[in-house]
Image: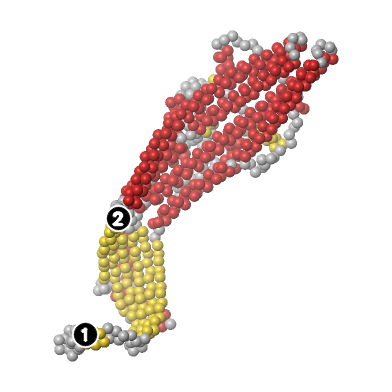
Amino acid sequence: MAVLKTLRRSTIALAITNSEIAKAISLLLFFPLLLSGCAAYFDTAPKPELVDKVAQRLQDEESLALSTLATKLPQTLEAAITESETKRAKLKLDLPTITTPQSAIKPPETHRQLSIAEARGLALSNNLDLKIALVEPSIAATYVGEEQAKFDDLIFANVKYANKDTPQLDGDVVSFKTVDPDSPLKGEIAKLNLLPQSTEQLDFAVGVVVPLRTGGKVTISSPFNLKQTDLYLPSEQYLAGVRFSISQPLLRNAGIDNNVAGIRIARYEQSIVDLKTRLQSIRVLAAIDKAYWALYVAWEELEIQQQQYQLAEQNLAMVRRRVKAGLTAKIEINRAEIGIAERMTSLIVAKTKLKTTQRKLLLLLNDPRYDLDSRIVINTTTAPTLLNFAFNRNSLVEKALAGRLELLEMELKLAADATKIDYLENQTLPLFMLDYSYGKQGRSDDLGNAYADSFSGQYDNWAVGLKMEIPLTNELRRSRLSRAVQQRLQRLTTQELKILTVRREIYDALDQVAQNWQLIIANRQSVVLAGANYTAELKQFNEGLRTMTEVLGTLTKLGSAQIKEIKAIADYQVALIDLAYATGTLLGYGRVDIGESESEQMTGVK
């Protein structure tokens, strides 16, 4: 095409003026760089003190050293029982020694010895709730990137080719006004017609748009136009130039803080998600600990029921010998057999409870090696903590107020609310937009000379304008601002309620720990008394003073006392777990690393 041939002819001339064009564009680009010269221009981070607080909390260890919060050395269970017995006559009663034959328990096909530390490790690696929570930080990071993308620079280019053949067209009737007063055309009236033309036209523009954090926008572009006409008077015309424009709001949407508010709110939300993920890990580990001690109770209950069954069998054998010897009525055999049947029922229930409790633990562990319906038998190996702690209640409350992730999350939400309110206040202002543009244009018969002509300074043009928008009522923006203020006031009240709730949870947990410790002591003494009572009743039966029904009744009470003691021990462990959770920590644990926040990639769980 003729246009393309002409472009090739202009290549050499264009190369000559490249250095001049580059210098001019560099000068134009220097203007927006001046706006970004200060560090505050790029500052989109939330409040530094709050960022440091979140980072420090996520680095803190979640372990709760119980001994450091106690007012004196922990007391062992034996010491506590001795202290209790000195307040009254010391009981010289012993629980009868009972041996459990190994043949009484059918050996399972597979055993898995599991400590509480191993259970925690498996949960951190496989727990589905935790895996779901670990995706949230990555999702939150995309919202930050989305807000930051609003300030991405935009490079644009457009090209348009047109070929137009037009017929002769009637023009306007005109009157000539000449410069020369003696011209024969002066005052003549004529009609101007447009002659048939064949026109080729090529338009091209390239540039960059730079969004400013002040709310404005800078556009730098370089357009050119090539126009060729044939017939009658053929012509070839190049128009080229450089343009610069800037639009800057003066009230609404003006200022760095208003334009980076979305980024700051997204960063607050990202920090909130990091805290929620950490909190979810603490919840999962606390649930694992409780499920572990529930399995411990199920195993102990099964062992007690097996012991009850074996003692009932021993009693039946003893009764049969006495009946055979004529020392006891035959009805006692029936009574002894009823006792065995009752204990068989309790044994079946205990075995089923062990399976369901183990299945709950397996669900939390989600270990791919063990199916929920697996025949694996998990044995607990961690011994319970049997130490009494005299806690400093005020220190625990202070630790909870400083360490509870929910309270720190509330601080972040309040900071985000404050940022949102500042932004919405700005949105209630009128819109005043200042526009300025400046350009250079040149014309020539080839492209290179056209660009050179544009920098001659002969054909400069500029414009300045002001745009204004003032809503009549502004009710929409005022309503949004009022709603944000009310939500912040509501959240402030919620924060006060959370602080009171945390304090109540600490005091409740402390009372629960004290109660369960006393229950351990009381139930331990009940076991000793029940054991002594059973021994005495059995001796009375051998002397013919008691029936087997009465003996089995005391045996049942012994089993109930043993189960209550085991449950009190497990409840004490759970109370310690709840106390640690109430302070925002984990019992006997270090620190849980849930990836990295902000711009860093999520690395997993340690």
Q: Nearer the viewer, residue 151 or 595?
A: 151
In the image, residue 469 above or below residue 425: below
Q: Say left or right for 555 vs 24.
A: right
- Mark carried by residue 343: none
Q: Look at the picture and state if 1 lies above or below 73.
A: below
Residue hosting label 1: 175
Residue found 35% across the figure and 76% down from its top: 225
Distance (Cα) linking label 2 and label 1: 49 Å
Q: Secondary structure at mark 2?
A: loop
Residue found 82% across the figure and 15% down from its top: 330
* Quadrant of the rendered image containing residue 222: bottom left
Residue 364 as seen in the image, left or right of residue 374:
left
Percent from the top left, x then y, of residue 166?
37, 84
- Viewer-side residue, 195 vs 245: 195
For discs 2 and 1, the disc positioned in front in the rendered view: 2
**312 and 40: which one is in front?**
312
Amino acid under disc 1: Ser
Q: Please say which color scheme the image uses.
A: secondary structure
Question: Is residue 588 positioned above or below 329 on the image?
Answer: below
The residue pinned by badge 2 equals: 471
Residue placed furthest toward the left: 181
Placement of the N terminus among the 4 image quadrants: bottom left
Residue ID at (66%, 27%): 300
Residue at (15, 89) in percent of width and height = 182
